[in-house]
């Protein structure tokens, strides 16, 4: 089995930040995975990793999307189960790799926000601004 970490990184990490998203009401990532035969009702999506790269100022479309799927049968509380595992032990998941048009990927979400800064001190920092 391959080993990876669910953490954003690029070759140089010139900018770092965070992200947050709200699932679309009727057609979020889990529904898309099930509808397209990538996930069963006994599985739970525990992560998404997507990358856009090597575009050299040209739009890269489709993008590489990796959905992390956890076998959840018999687990009513997946978050509690994963939280109870040793922190230094990797979690066994199935990685579903798809090429997806950018517009289709973002249609899985109601809202999507990413923040980036080259300064570590700006992460999570309140700021005032003038328009």
Image (cartoon, grey):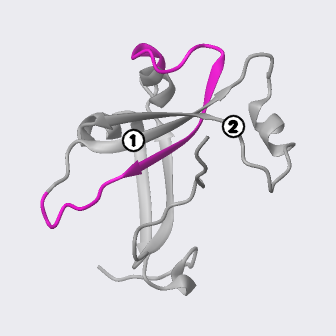
Secondary structure, mark 1, is strand
Callout 2 crowding tier (Cα within 10 Å): few <14, some 14–19, many ≥20: few
Which residue occupies 63% across, 21% down? 43
Specify which label sits upstream in the sequence, 2 or 1.
1
Decide: marks 2, 1 in contact (CB < 8 A)? no
Instruction: Provide the residue designation for mark 2.
Output: 92
The part of the image, by quadrant, that contains residue 11 is bottom left
Q: Position of residue 46 (x, y in %)?
A: 62, 37
Q: Is residue 43 visible?
A: yes
Residue drawn at 43 percent across, 78 percent down: 117
| The quadrant where residue 93 appears | top right
Q: Residue at x 47, y 73 (%)?
A: 16
Residue 111: in magenta span: no
- The numbered dot on residue 14 is none
Q: Please state which of the two labelled residues, at mark 2 or mark 1, is closer to the viewer.
A: 2
The residue segment tinted magenta is 34-58
Q: Is residue 90 above or below residue 116?
A: above
Residue at the left extreme of this rendering: 58
Residue 57 image-quadrant placement: bottom left
Distance Cα–Cα, label 2 vs label 1: 18 Å
- Crowding at dot 1, Cα within 10 Å, few <14 / some 14-19 / many 20+, comes out as many
Q: Position of residue 122 (x, y in %)?
A: 52, 82
Above-or-below relation of 68 to 71: below
Residue 26 showing in the rendered view: no
Image point (15%, 55%), residue name: 59
In the image shown, does 112 or 60 lie closer to the viewer?
60
Residue 57 in magenta stretch? yes
List x then y, in percent, for residue 56.
16, 67
Q: Nearer the viewer, residue 117 or 82?
A: 82
Q: Quick check: 79 above or below 44?
A: below
Which residue is denoted by mark 1 in the rendering? 65
């Amino acid at each position: 089995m391959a080993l990876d970490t669910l953490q954003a990184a690029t070759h140089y990490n010139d900018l770092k930040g965070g992200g947050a998203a709200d699932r679309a009401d009727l057609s979020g990532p889990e529904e898309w995975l099930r509808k397209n035969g990538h996930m069963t009702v006994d599985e739970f999506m525990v992560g998404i990793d997507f990358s856009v790269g090597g575009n050299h100022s040209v739009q890269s479309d489709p993008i590489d999307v990796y959905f992390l799927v956890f076998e959840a049968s018999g687990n009513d509380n997946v978050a509690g189960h994963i939280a109870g595992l040793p922190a230094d032990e990797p979690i066994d998941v199935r990685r579903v790799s798809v090429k997806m048009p950018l517009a289709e990927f973002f249609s899985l979400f109601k809202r999507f926000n990413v923040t980036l800064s080259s300064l570590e001190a700006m992460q999570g920092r309140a700021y005032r601004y003038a328009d």
